[in-house]
Amino acid sequence: MNNGNLEQKIAQLLDGDNRAFDYIYEQTNRPVYFAILYIVHDKMHAEDILQETYVRAIRSLQSYSPGTNFSAWLARIGKNLALNHLKRERREVATDFSTDPHLYGSQETNLPYIFDAAARILSEEEYKIIMLCHVSGYKRREVAQMLGMPVATVTWKNNEALKKLRRTLQEEAV
Amino acid sequence: MKKIQKLLSEQAEKILPDERVKENIRQELGYRDTEREFALANGGTAAHRGKRTLIAVVAAALAIALCLGILLPLLLHRNGTPGNLSGNKFLQIESTEDFYIYGAASVGSLLAASQADQASAATMSQRSDVSANAFSHAAGSSAAKTTSAKLVFGSGAASSQSAADNTETEKEIAETVNGYMALIENLLGNGSIDAQTTATPAENEYAGVYSYMTTITYHDLTGGNVHYILYYNKVLTGVEQEEDGKEESYAIDGVLSVGSEAYIVRGEHETEEESEPGETESESELTFTAYRRVNGEEIPYIRMQQEISSEQEDSETETERKFVYTYYDEKGQTLQSTTAEYEEEDGELEVLLTVQKGNEKDTLLFRRRSGNDALRVTARIAGRQYSFTVQIMRGADGKGYYSYDFSDYHGNFDRFDEDDEDDRDD
């Protein structure tokens, strides 16, 4: 991902050139999606919130400070919406559904076990790195750029996260 | 840790956001369909102006899929004789140059098949009786022009029967399999892929533009020689030394000459290596993309992506090789992707193709025993399993052709068992 190009497209979108949207979405949606999924643990809800995130962000694009990390700005909006979603769910279902959402009907789509385990045992950063590297197929260098951290940090966190996952899956004999 | 990575990547589809999310956002923001700009894999963008007919694109892709490979041997220069089977072409790839050469040979074969398909489509468009026999008629009419194409449907003693005498299912399966024969030609053909690289000669039209000229030659399944010429510049894009390893990137930029056509091609090769006590991990990825011009824009046409990753933990080394061929439509969006994997065992070469078209997945396993010109094919197409033989034959004129034998429907489908997945990795 080239941040210069992304900033250029954001400027175009601000100027009313709606064709820039596709590029912006393709370059940014994955880290935002995984930040949301880490909180809600549900694909369908995460997709809904992802949609709402982009709609809100683009409608208030003037509030983004050019040259700062656009993906991180989007992810902040997405995480706030995800947390609001959880609060709303809690009000509607008065129980601790976050540990066993399937028991209370608050989970719409069951994810494969490994993703649940990843969201449960990994930090948000580790989770995003694992998902971007191994699920979305980005190179570590690209992930480093997306998340605004050195490649060596991504590599280290990636390895640590994989080891944690392996240990957990072995212990739980999946 | 490779197994964890594999587990994650295999289940990616179940977790990644649906493409409809983007469309919903566009709709909610009130963006019109004409206001589109597609991100290209090479970092650029291509504006889409006006609506194109999706049906025409899909039909064209289907036509390519149906005819790919059948006419390939007809249009390629050939003068060789069948040689001995000499192994897994993936294992011959050892250097960056090998990557480029294989990429050019492989994508070149698909481009040649695509050219053949367009020629065939032009012939077929003049026909008014596009019936169930259209495919065999098309092959037949091409044979009349070139005196070398022949596709025989039927089985055993009835192998000389006309296509009309065979079941629709057999014809459909043969048509589908023919869609992948260009790749199989490339992967299971005799001998190695040879390449001669020189400086681009001063009298050449690309002299002064591209520094290198590589002539790539290999044998197809019928023993004929196939050759393409790659003109290119090679650029070292970076070497990064990290505390725990190094990362190198190369790129190539050039033109691939296939028959009378020249295609803009770009390639990128990245390697990543990292190590820590007792564990070394490396990843290597090549993308080789041929582009076509649509309304003055360069749009990806066919891309080969190769990923080779190896992990050494204590005394064990795990290596995984994947080759993914992706076709794009005129908007630069994916039409179909085919993953090719090799296996060599007891003198038998196997190529497993996994074809993804939208939500549909077909699997085709081709086996070729050393010294044998027949390919055993086991396939799962549209949810059903088939087993048959493709015989590589040579006519009196010396030209090669394929004959399909559906007499044996009792194939061994064990290869497709889920439990067998891990066996392919090593």
Image (tube, coloured by chain):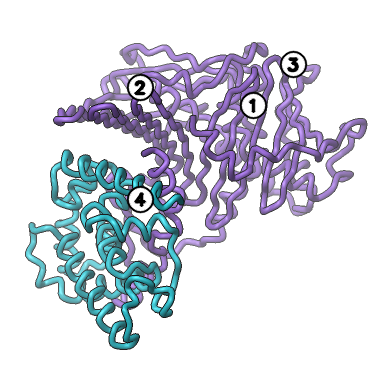
Chain colours: A cyan, B purple
* Whole-number angstrom distance, CA of label 2 to CA of label 3: 35 Å
Residues under numbered marks 3 and 4 in contact, where contact means CB atoms less than 8 Å apart: no
Q: Of the residues shown, which amino acid type is indicated by label 3?
A: Gly
- Where residue B202 appears, as percent x and y from the top left, is 31, 13
Residue at 54%, 49% (x, y): give it: B356
- Comparing A171 with B113, the one in front is A171
Q: Which residue is mark 3?
A: B398
Q: Earlier in the sequence, mark 3 or mark 1?
A: 1
- Where residue B80 appears, as percent x and y from the top left, is 63, 12
Residue at 19%, 73% (x, y): give it: A80
Instruction: Give a yes or no on whether discs 3 and 1 share a subunit.
Output: yes
- Where residue B295 appears, as percent x and y from the top left, is 38, 51
Nearest to viewer (mark 4 / mark 2): 4
Q: Which mark is residue A168?
A: 4
Q: Which residue is mark 2?
A: B205
Label 2 resides on the chain identified as B
Confirm whether residue B264 shows in the render. Answer: no
The quadrant holding residue B118 is top right
Label 1 SS: helix
Q: Of the residues shown, which amino acid type is indicated by label 4?
A: Thr
Residue at 37%, 69% (x, y): give it: A42
Residues under numbered marks 4 and 2 in contact, where contact means CB atoms less than 8 Å apart: no
- Where residue B38 appears, as percent x and y from the top left, is 33, 56
Label 4 resides on the chain identified as A
Q: Is residue B277 above or below residue A145?
A: above
* Whole-number angstrom distance, CA of label 3 to CA of label 1: 12 Å
Nearest to viewer (mark 1 / mark 2): 1
Q: Which residue is mark 1?
A: B73
